[in-house]
Amino acid sequence: METFTLLTTTWNVDKANEMAEGREVDTFDPKHVEHMLQRTTENGDGSHTTNMGITVNWDHVPNVDLSKPVIFVERQYKDGTQGHMMIDGWHRVAKALDEGVDQLPCVVLSVKEGKSLEL
């Protein structure tokens, strides 16, 4: 099972991809999340972990398919505000940024769906 963890939350990415199948696809600018890929630490296996805890294997980046939508989940925060968290597609974002691509396809899952993906 593929998962994505950020801080204390882990999502089931395989299940997210199943939910996203056949959904309406939107687009987003990968520069909006570029800051989350900054300041990396090399892990010694070709991958790097960012200061946000996101691991990207840079050897894999050239092989990813930019036509596959990245997946966001809507989030409801304790202060009542809402936002989005990308739980699948970090390698695609890295490739898009490297190649100067300014729009990537994406699917946004609801707060309820996002909660159901949490492990």
Image: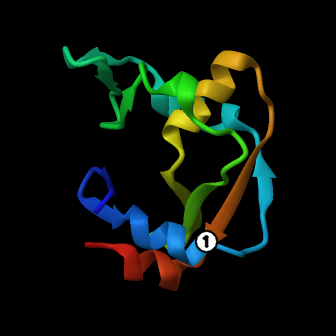
Which residue: 32% across, 73% down? 118
Q: Residue furthest front?
A: 63
Residue 52 sits above or below residue 17 on the image: above
Which residue: 41% across, 62% down? 13
- On the rendered image, what quadrant is the N terminus found in? bottom left
Which residue: 59% across, 78% down? 110
Q: Is residue 52 left or right of residue 36?
A: left
* Along the viewing direction, whichever of 35 and 48 lies nearer the viewer: 48
Quadrant in the rendering for residue 10: bottom left
Q: Which residue is mark 1?
A: 20
Q: Is residue 105 left or right of residue 72?
A: right
Residue 3 sits above or below residue 46 on the image: below
Q: Is residue 65 visible?
A: yes
Which residue: 66% across, 23% down? 97
Residue 72, given in percent of the width and then of the height, sits at 57, 60
Residue 114, given in percent of the width and then of the height, sits at 47, 75
Element assignment for label 1: helix
* Along the viewing direction, whichever of 113 and 79 lies nearer the viewer: 113
**Residue type, mark 1 in image:** Ala
